[in-house]
């Protein structure tokens, strides 16, 4: 049992740098924007500004962006073309969040 726990701790320690954000990577603003948008969605759900359908649509849009980002990072870095594409999708998602939160529909 002790060996299992030690091996898990060791493997977690060795793998942690692989999952950590790389500050030298210019794609980090993409991650920050995604987190900001997810936070805006959560806030809209909490306040009742977003209906269930609106929330579902916005979360699907965020998932699509996450998939595109994974695909862009699959070769180790995000090219300028891929970054522009991600920016366009993030811009659209941001506008969609704003529109849905400020329309006349409420969850109540």
Image (cartoon, grey):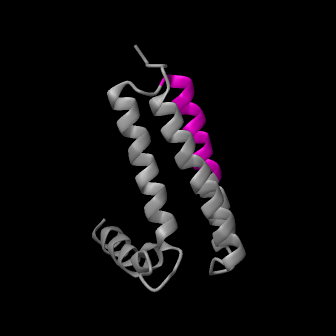
78 over 90 or under it: above or below: below
Is 93 magenta? The answer is no
Quadrant assignment for the N terminus: bottom left
Residue 56 quadrant: top right
Residue 82 quadrant: bottom right
Is 58 magenta? The answer is yes
Tell me where the magenta segment starts and ends, as one range. 51-64
Give x and y (percent) for residue 19: 45, 72
Figure label count:
0
- In the rendered image, the residue lying farthest to the top is 108
Q: Nearer the viewer, residue 107 or 99?
A: 99
Q: Nearer the viewer, residue 106 or 103?
A: 103
Q: Nearer the viewer, residue 33 or 7?
A: 33
Give x and y (percent) for residue 21: 43, 75
- Secondary structure predominantly adopted by residues drawn in magenta: helix
Question: Is residue 59 toward the left or the right of residue 67 in the image?
Answer: left
- Residue at image position (38%, 47%) is 39
């Amino acid at each position: 049992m002790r060996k299992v726990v030690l091996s898990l701790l060791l493997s977690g320690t060795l793998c942690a740098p692989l999952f950590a954000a790389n500050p030298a990577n210019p794609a980090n603003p993409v991650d920050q924007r995604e987190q900001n948008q997810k936070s805006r969605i959560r806030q809209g759900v909490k306040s009742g500004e977003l209906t269930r359908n609106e929330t579902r649509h916005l979360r699907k849009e965020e998932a699509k962006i996450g998939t595109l980002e994974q695909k862009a990072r699959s070769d180790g870095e995000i090219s300028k073309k891929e970054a522009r594409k991600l920016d366009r999708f993030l811009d659209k998602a941001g506008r969609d969040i704003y529109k849905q939160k400020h329309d006349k529909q409420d969850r109540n």
